[in-house]
Image (spheres, rainbow, N blue to C red):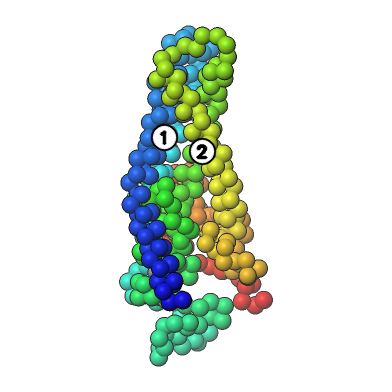
Amino acid sequence: MHRSGATMAWNVFKFCTALRGLGSIMILLVLGVVGVTYYAVVLTNYGPALYAGGLDSLVALAVLILFHSLLVMLLWSYFSVVFTDPGSVPPNWKPMIDEERGEADPLVGTEFSNVLSDPNQRVRYCRKCNQLKPPRCHHCSVCGRCVLKMDHHCVWVVNCVGALNYKCFLLFLFYTFLETTLVTASLLPHFITFFSDGEIPGTPGSLATTFLAFVLNLAFALSVLGFLIMHISLVAANTTTIEAYEKKTTPKWRYDLGRRKNFEQVFGMDKKYWFIPAYSDEDIRKMPALQGLDYPSKPDFDSQ
Ligand SMILES: [Zn+2]
Ligand SMILES: [Zn+2]
């Protein structure tokens, strides 16, 4: 029994090490897909079409402007998820004590484990990091540390998705969906000519790239759409992917403040910043939830 447990722990460790090793390869893979798509859309098909004249030139211009704008937003969001610290626990973090209720410091004279600061919420302790866990914080075995409001470890961005980069991650999904849909739609006429009987224009290399780019972008558009729908429902309910799995046993969710507030907790209150992977200074100052340490719960939660 003990042996099999140790073997399993070892296997998980090896799996996590493998995921970590996969890191830079995934970034190269993303850049590779972007490169193939760029070659197919800009260099092979719509760039040359600019000089065709008439309506074709106008369509090509529109496709190219939209393609490049979405690409800039996609890459900006992508590298923001990759390089933003998802949220680490400040050293010696302690839960805030509710002074109004006159509760004593729950940590005094205990071993920090299973301490109650509030009847509904336990203060949890991470044995691996040797520190207390703020609410909604989870330990990531791939990163080897605790991550604030951890959503999941994402192999595509080689980082954890947590409190501070969840918005960037959602925007990355959003712009990837728009870009891959645009590419699929704009390459569709070229893809259809593969199956026509007439002579197909272009070199074998450019035809192969167009074919590959179409198939890849269609596959990404469909799978990202699934993720996007899932995350929209998670944001609407103020739940992380991890909590969605845990929540099944507790029907009431303390952090659900209503759709508008749940949305603002992730995207900020400043509308100008909703579509870019950043927050206004005022949002960062005003919203402790963005730091991942303090989450307001439903006002009526404790009374029910
Ligand atoms: Zn930890
Ligand atoms: Zn991680």
- Image quarter where the C terminus lies is bottom right
- In the rendered view, tell whether residue 17 sits above or below residue 78: below
Residue 220's disc is 2
Find residue 9 and report its horizontal and vertical position in percent: 41, 68
Find residue 253 and report its horizontal and vertical position in percent: 61, 67
Can residue 248 be seen by looking at this rendering?
yes
Can residue 282 be seen by looking at this rendering?
no
| Closer to us: 155 or 96 | 155
The kind of secondary structure element at disc 2 is helix
Which amino acid does the dot numbered 1 rest on?
Val
Residue 236's disc is none
Which amino acid does the dot numbered 2 rest on?
Phe
C-alpha separation, residue under disc 2 versus residue under disc 1:
10 Å
| Closer to us: 203 or 69 | 203
Q: Quadrant of residue 36?
A: top left
- Identify the residue shown where x is 35% and y is 40%: 28
Q: Mark 1 = which residue?
A: 33
Q: Are marks 2 and 1 in contact (CB under 8 Å)?
A: yes
- Identify the residue shown where x is 49% and y is 22%: 62
- In the rendered view, tell whether residue 130 sits above or below residue 27: below
- Identify the residue shown where x is 54% and y is 64%: 243
- Mark 1 neighbour density, 10 Å: few (under 14) some (14–19) many (20 or more): some
- Identify the residue shown where x is 52% and y is 23%: 187
| Closer to us: 241 or 87 | 241
Instruction: Find out if the beta carbon at label 1 lies less than 8 Å from the nearest ligand 2 atom.
Output: no
N-terminal-most mark, 2 or 1: 1
- In the rendered view, tell whether residue 55 sits above or below residue 263: above
Find residue 29 and report its horizontal and vertical position in percent: 38, 39
- In the rendered view, tell whether residue 41 sits above or below residue 290: above
Q: Is residue 159 left or right of residue 245?
A: left
Q: Is residue 166 left or right of residue 262?
A: left
- Mark 2 neighbour density, 10 Å: few (under 14) some (14–19) many (20 or more): some
